[in-house]
């Protein structure tokens, strides 16, 4: 299948429009499309991880090229000048060498190139690096160029690219001016060009979706690919079906008890001495936390797909309890994997799940916590994929899970938006939510993403401190990596082994973070901070005594950060905290850690 | 010439052995490879330990954990391979999850594999859709990226995967993770026939192959067999000679 490269990108919206392309090109040589390393690095954040980022150079030095490759970073280099063979050989990443084709002699020259790929173009006019003129494709006839290294450029556009591919059967086609209007890239033309190449072919069903910038993807064993694709199709279809929404909202209101209030916290407002504080009360949901919003949505989807067996992982047990509850309601077979350590810490939830009819499987491998429970749930899914749905509990995992979980949790933010407009007639200044995998936070934030005036803050678990080795501050301390089906931010060692996370709250005790959060952190739309175990415990006491609401340990992280944030804000401002769950499940921990409390 | 390109021409059924690098100490790897080569295997997959091996069953996961406890890393394994001076006549492959490769650097991984004489790479959590993440870099070193196909691979994807397959196709015999099993399901036979009809490269069956009865059942429908857990178990128990009848059952019939 011929690949597509969209070249000469300068704007984020055009990079995003090219998300289905196999490669994007940034021009570093003098040209009207020239970008700096810094600009390209910023744009590169929006390129899916498996697409190539290609830098275009004209007679640059090896040092310039190497610095640019490292700075962006680039995965390939394209040379458009008179670069010597030594330079081609010295470049570490794969190299494309471009040739302007006028005659058969030019064709012979490109056959001698030492580069990994050769790009054929029409002769340039003002600048080196392609002119947009169409070259005579028939010059390649009988030239015996290995089609696996041939890239065709030069005057391609959505109208002629099909013919160019038929005639030259290249490895890749490259377009720049052919997808522009008035010397600027055109979103519609970019998408049309890609569609023309990928067509109604196999590729269309394999199209690249499920990325948030470079994060996300479907990094799962082949056995699961059919299931994730089926899930993707089923979800896309259900999403558009009003009946599905009706059913989902029916259970949210009649069974979960939504909508939940946005409570004005009068005494916290006075005590913290800053903005008006509102609490989004996910703690009032049936089963005690936001997890049930997602469990209902996914269970309805599973039944729609004809699957009546559910497997899930759980850390603190909240997602396990929510899943077991919904499986009881809908009479679904339910297996929950839970780490041995967590089973010890959360005996009450283990019993609740059993009472609800679920089978709880103890995971003794690895650190015997949430990460290992996900591993076992994935293995179980691999072995039982035909009749079982994996009901993942956070905005994690292979596409479509992060998108789907976000959508099912977005009810939190949608209600909040409607409620604050009713109460205050305007949007809040700041919204805070705790982040482990990130499902309550993304559900709260998503409806506000486009409202640039609303400051969004995610709060991670700093455990015993981000400078110790006992924390779960993935965005503060993590690096890019693949775990559980997606590229995200990960706590890992130098060899790429995933490290154990630590937090007093079992629900934040995960070494990764959902891919959409990783992207929102990169782009700066959401700011991520961290709160230690001790600060979270102090916030539990504070909120319990000020508002008569005992929060879950997870939610207490957002509350602790709110107390700090309030000091920077004024009385005419509004702050919203997502209280993701109630503290009943944590009572044993509170009793132990807060012993002697008076 | 990549050694994997010579596989089909040999005619005999192939036996691909999997070893977990560093299980029992990285210094044991060379004797294990030499032993397997001497025992007549066709190729050897060298497994890189990973903290979260979701495609693997308990045997290989436990072996990986033992290796991780010894401090084994991708880098150390590649260094070890580069230091070998004994004669290796058969293709060596690296089997690793994606994350250690990303952390190591894809380009560097390809280059170092090239220097270590690696002929192919298997990455179980890198599906066809995302293979561009490593394919160009491996191509540059003429290292084959081996694709897996399974009983759940749809026909439309199967065609796409096989069209670009190189080296050999790793055909997974079970719906599940790696590990020894008593029985293979009957639809496996038809599945293998279907793949073999379409595949431009040899088709090797893997996952769950541990007995000569498995071999007998699929012999006519595949070009070879991949054996992992049974070998890892045998090495760990100090009884690797017990695997020799299985090797002979495949390669001499």
Image: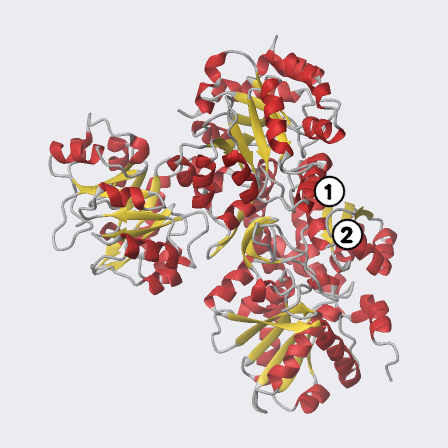
Q: In which quadrant will I find the C terminus of chain A?
A: bottom right
Q: Chain of mark 2?
A: A
Q: Quadrant of residue A88?
A: top left
Q: For this view, does B197 lie left or right of residue A86?
A: right
Q: Judge by depth and name the residue closer to the eye, A140 or A354.
A: A140
Would you say residue A581 is visible in this rendering?
no
Q: Compared with residue A451, is residue A247 higher up or lower down, i.e. above or below?
A: above
**Residue on which disc 1 sits:** A308
Q: State which quadrant residue A348 falls in.
A: bottom right
The one nearer the camera, A325 or B106, is B106
Q: At x 85% / y 49%, what residue is drawn?
A: A357
Residue drawn where x is 50% and y is 36% of the image: B82
Q: Is residue B100 at least partly visible in the picture? A: yes
Neighbours of disc 1 within 10 Å: few (<14), some (14-19), many (20+) = some
Residue tagged by mark 2? A339
Residue B218: % across, % down: 63, 16
Chain letter of mark 1 equals A
Rounded to the nearest angstrom, the CA distance separating label 1 from label 2 is 24 Å
Query: Do tags 1 and 2 sit on the same chain?
Result: yes
């Amino acid at each position: 299948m011929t690949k597509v490269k969209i070249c000469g990108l300068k704007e984020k919206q055009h990079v995003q429009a090219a998300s289905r392309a196999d490669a994007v090109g940034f021009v570093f040589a003098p040209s009207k499309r020239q970008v700096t390393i810094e600009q390209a690095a910023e744009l590169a954040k929006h390129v899916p991880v498996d697409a190539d980022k290609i830098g275009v150079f004209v007679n640059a030095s090896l040092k310039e090229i190497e610095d640019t490759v490292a700075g962006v970073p680039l995965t390939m280099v394209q040379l458009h000048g008179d670069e010597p063979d030594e330079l081609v050989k010295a470049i570490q990443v794969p190299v494309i060498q471009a040739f302007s084709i006028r005659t058969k002699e030019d064709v012979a020259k490109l056959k001698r190139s030492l580069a990994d790929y050769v790009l054929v173009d029409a002769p340039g006019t003002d600048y080196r690096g392609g002119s947009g003129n169409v070259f005579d494709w028939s010059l390649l006839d009988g030239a015996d160029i290995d089609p696996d290294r041939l890239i065709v450029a030069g005057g391609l556009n959505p109208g002629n690219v099909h013919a160019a591919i038929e005639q030259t059967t290249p490895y890749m086609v490259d377009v720049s001016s052919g997808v522009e209007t008035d010397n600027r890239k055109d979103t519609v033309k970019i998408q049309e060009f890609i569609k023309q190449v990928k067509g109604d072919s196999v590729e269309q069903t394999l199209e690249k979706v499920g990325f948030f910038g470079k994060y996300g993807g479907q990094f799962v064993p082949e056995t699961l690919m059919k299931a994730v694709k089926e899930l993707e199709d089923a979800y896309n279809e259900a999403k558009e079906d009003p009946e599905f929404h009706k059913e989902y909202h029916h259970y949210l209101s009649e069974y979960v008890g939504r909508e939940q209030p946005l409570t004005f916290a009068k005494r916290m407002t006075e005590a913290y001495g800053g903005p008006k504080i509102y609490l989004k009360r996910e703690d009032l949901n049936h089963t005690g936390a936001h997890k049930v919003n997602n469990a209902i949505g996914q269970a309805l989807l599973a039944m729609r797909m004809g699957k009546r067996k559910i497997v899930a992982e759980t850390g603190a047990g909240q997602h396990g309890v929510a899943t077991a509850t919904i499986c009881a309601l809908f009479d679904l077979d339910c297996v929950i994997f839970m780490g041995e350590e967590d089973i010890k810490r959360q005996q009450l939830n283990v019993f609740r799940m059993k009472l609800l009819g679920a089978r709880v499987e103890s995971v003794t491998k690895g650190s015997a916590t949430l990460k290992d429970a996900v591993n076992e749930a994935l293995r179980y899914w691999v072995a039982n994929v035909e009749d079982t749905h994996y009901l993942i509990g956070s905005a994690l995992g292979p596409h479509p899970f992060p998108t789907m979980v976000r959508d099912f949790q977005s009810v939190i933010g949608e209600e909040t938006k409607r409620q604050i407009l009713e109460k205050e007639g305007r949007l809040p200044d700041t919204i805070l939510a705790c982040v482990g995998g990130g499902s309550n936070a993304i559900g709260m934030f998503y409806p506000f993403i486009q409202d640039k005036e609303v400051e969004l803050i995610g709060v991670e678990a700093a455990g015993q401190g981000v400078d110790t080795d006992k924390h779960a501050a993935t965005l503060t301390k993590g690096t890019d990596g693949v775990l559980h089906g997606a590229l995200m931010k990960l706590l890992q060692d130098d060899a790429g082994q995933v490290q154990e996370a630590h937090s007093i709250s079992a629900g934040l005790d995960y070494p990764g973070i959902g891919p959409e959060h990783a992207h929102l952190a990169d782009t700066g739309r959401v700011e991520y901070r961290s709160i230690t175990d001790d600060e979270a415990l102090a916030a539990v006491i504070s909120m319990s005594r000020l508002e008569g609401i005992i929060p879950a340990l997870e939610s207490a992280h957002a509350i602790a950060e709110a107390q700090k944030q309030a000091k920077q804000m004024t009385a005419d401002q509004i702050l919203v905290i997502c209280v993701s769950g109630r503290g009943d499940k944590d009572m044993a921990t509170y009793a132990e850690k807060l012993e002697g409390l008076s | 010439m990549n050694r994997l390109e010579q596989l089909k021409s040999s005619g005999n059924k192939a036996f691909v052995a999997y070893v977990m690098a560093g299980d029992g100490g990285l210094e044991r790897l060379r004797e294990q490879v030499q032993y397997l080569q001497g025992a007549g295997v066709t190729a050897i997959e060298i497994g890189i330990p990973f903290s979260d091996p979701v495609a693997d069953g308990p045997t290989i996961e436990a072996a990986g954990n033992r290796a991780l406890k010894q401090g084994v890393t991708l880098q150390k394994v590649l260094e070890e391979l580069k230091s070998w001076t004994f004669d290796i006549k058969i293709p060596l492959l690296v089997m690793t999850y994606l994350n250690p490769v990303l952390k190591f650097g894809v380009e560097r991984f390809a280059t170092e594999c090239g220097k270590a004489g690696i002929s192919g790479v298997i990455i179980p959590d890198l599906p066809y859709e995302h293979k561009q993440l490593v394919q160009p870099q491996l191509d540059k070193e003429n290292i084959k990226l081996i694709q897996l196909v399974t009983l759940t691979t749809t026909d439309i994807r199967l065609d796409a995967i096989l069209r670009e397959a190189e080296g050999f196709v790793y055909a997974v015999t079970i719906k599940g993770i790696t590990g020894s099993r008593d029985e293979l399901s009957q639809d496996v036979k038809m599945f293998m026939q279907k793949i073999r009809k379409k595949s431009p490269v040899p088709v090797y069956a893997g996952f769950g192959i541990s007995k000569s009865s498995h071999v007998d059942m699929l012999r006519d429908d595949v070009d070879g067999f991949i054996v992992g857990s049974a070998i890892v178990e045998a090495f760990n128990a100090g009884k690797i000679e017990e695997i020799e009848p299985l090797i002979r059952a495949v390669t001499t019939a």
